[in-house]
Image (tube, helix red, strand yellow):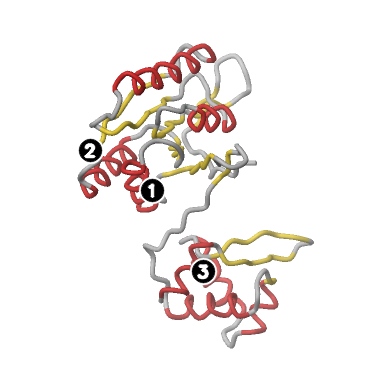
Amino acid sequence: MFSPRLRNNATLNPGSDKWLVMQTFISPIGFNTTSVTRSLLDYGIDSEDTVQLIRPSTETDDNRAAEAVEDVTQLLQEIEPTISVSVESVAHDDFAEAVMTFSNLLTTASGDVVVSLSGGARDILLPLTVATMAHDEIVTTTLGYSDIDGKVRDLELPSLTETPSKGAEMTLQAVAAANPPLTLPALAGELEPVKSTVTRHVNALEEIGYLTSWTENRTKHISLTLSGQLYLNTS
């Protein structure tokens, strides 16, 4: 269901052959806690993990807000008593300040960073989304809880911070024009450069998140990502 990136901070669990990976979950929380708890439980949470709940610094109902935080804290600690739960208050009336607050939260978070873009005040959710997109290289997984069907999904957020070389951009345009997915040999046949150059361009575009690839029957297949589509649409 989820496709987290490779986790690079694993430690071996003493006395077993299982690897433990510390995670920091960052999630807005409103008065309804379902979007928080479902996201955490569906994705999976362990004893060494940290949960940072985000609330606006100005509350419309302090009692309900405190109850929501307490409900989530109690549930998580019933599951794993050593889970760390904290609350971060973020200014709702200064968009730039809120974005930078979230930027700092993301860059200082420990372990794999999992962001839930669900629930809470819109004043908080939007700057969190912007900061998450800006720190694509830090965030391991982005989750979204659906108010319609109650499912938690892994969200692919676009990253538009990279500009490919002219040759790589031509390769990206060729992939789009060929109605992907297509194979690497077929792509090489569409372009004038030699196959090794096309392969280099494809690798570079994968590295910045504009293409994705997989191997099937020993043949490499290529497709545009959302980031790649948006880049072409705005370049």
Q: Percent from the top left, x then y, of residue 145?
A: 53, 39
Per the image, the residue denoted by label 2 is: 91
Q: Percent from the top left, x then y, of residue 176?
A: 58, 75
Residue at disc 3, secondary structure: helix
- Extreme-bottom residue of the structure: 192
Q: Identify whether 78 is placed above or below 122.
A: above
Q: Percent from the top left, x then y, of residue 10?
A: 50, 31
Q: Are marks 1 and 3 in contact (CB under 8 Å)?
A: no
State the residue at coordinates (42%, 75%).
Answer: 165
Sequence-wise, the earlier of marks 1 and 2 is: 2
Q: Amino acid at mark 1?
A: Thr
Q: Amino acid at mark 2?
A: Ala
State the residue at coordinates (50%, 65%).
Answer: 210
Q: CA distance from mark 1 to mark 2?
A: 15 Å
> Which class describes the residues within 10 Å of circle 2: few (<14), some (14-19), or many (20+)?
some
> Which class describes the residues within 10 Å of circle 3: few (<14), some (14-19), or many (20+)?
some
Q: Are marks 2 and 3 in contact (CB under 8 Å)?
A: no
Per the image, the residue denoted by label 3 is: 229
**Residue 66 vs residue 110, the one in the foreground:** 66
Q: Are marks 1 and 2 in contact (CB under 8 Å)?
A: no
